[in-house]
Image: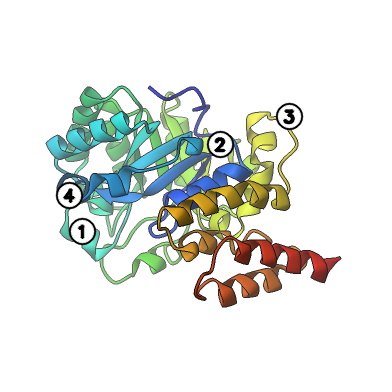
Amino acid sequence: MHLKNYKSHRFCVAPMLDWTDRHCRYFHRLISRHALLYTEMVTTGALLHGDPNRFLQFNNAEHPVAFQLGGSDPKDLAVCAKMIEDWGYDEVNLNVGCPSDRVQNGRFGACLMAEPELVGECMATMLQAVSIPVTVKSRIGIDERDSYEELLDFVMTVANAGCNTFIVHARKAWLSGLSPKQNREVPPLRYDRVYQLKNDLPKLEIILNGGITTLDQAEEELKHVDGVMVGREAYHNPYLLAEVDRRFFDEVCKPRSRQEVLNLLIPYIQQQLKNGVRLNSISRHILGLFHGAPGARGWRRHISENVGKPGADENVIVDALKSLINDVY
């Protein structure tokens, strides 16, 4: 087990498709030592029939890190969960929240909220296969099946199968008529439903996801739930994470400055470039590092204009920082 740095779900960065890849997670870890990071969702089919190394590869510096899995076949999920544990991840998370058509066609994601018994079977089988925590990320409901009673029944059924931690996106999902992007914005947030879950099932660990954009808001939500999960705000404004360790994990160390973060990232970029990784695969994740700070626009512009040029390397980032410092000071 690799749980020595796994403090809790008190503050998590959400799994986000096309965003929270290994380069993004390495960068986020340079800003916060303790926030629990999640991979993008990967399907059982991709692990079993594709190149598992491509999806499972990560840097040990990313700990604590959880792997989000998509699927609905209990045996396949158990095999994949064991692979994930053997690679050294700290947690397996089952996706029961993604509303995209592609996900529904594969019979996983949010549509599984209509099949709590199947999710419970999946959970029990995975728990038998591994010794690391297995958790669930869901919505508060789907389509017209959005009553609190149905949510409570889903959670209790899965909890009875052995799951102790539920990450709940406080919006329901429409399985048709809305795009995945619209499903993150259009259905109203119902934090009260998640609060009620914690009140009714106090022994379970309940993590709130959806619409959290500031650390003040996150602290306020912790009066009602066990943890918070921040998504898009942590990606577009990653330096938000700088105060997480002090405010949520009683860390006494001074946060790293943005420049210190970049100084630590440069050797990583150099190594990845040697391994054949394109600079843009890393630089796209750091565009928001100076969000809200003087010179942020010039920082983004310099990187965007130079990252695709022949021979682009870590000096694009170094020069962007020099340019920002010169512009501001």
Outermost residue on the right side: it is 329
User: Which residue position is annotated with label 4?
Assistant: 45
Query: What kind of residue is marked 4?
Result: Gly
Residue 186 vertical position relative to residue 94 in the rendered view, above or below = below
Element marked by disc 1: helix
Q: Is the Cβ of the residue at disc 4 closer than 8 Å to that at disc 2?
A: no
Residue 104, disc? 1
Q: Rounded to the nearest whole Å, what is the CA distance between mark 4 and mark 2?
A: 37 Å
Give the residue at mark 2: 224
Side of 135 relative to 239 (left or right): left
Percent position of residue 145, x then y: 27, 53
Q: Which of the pair 162/239 is nearer the observer?
A: 239
Report the residue marked by disc 3.
252
Q: Nearer the viewer, mark 3 or mark 2?
A: 3
Point 31% across, 48% down: residue:
55
Alpha carbon distance from label 3 to label 2: 25 Å
CA gap between label 1 and label 3 equals: 45 Å
In the image, taking residue 301 as reference, residue 173 lies left or right, namely: left
- Between disc 2 and disc 1, the foreground one is 1
Question: Sequence-wise, which precedes: disc 1 or disc 3?
Answer: 1
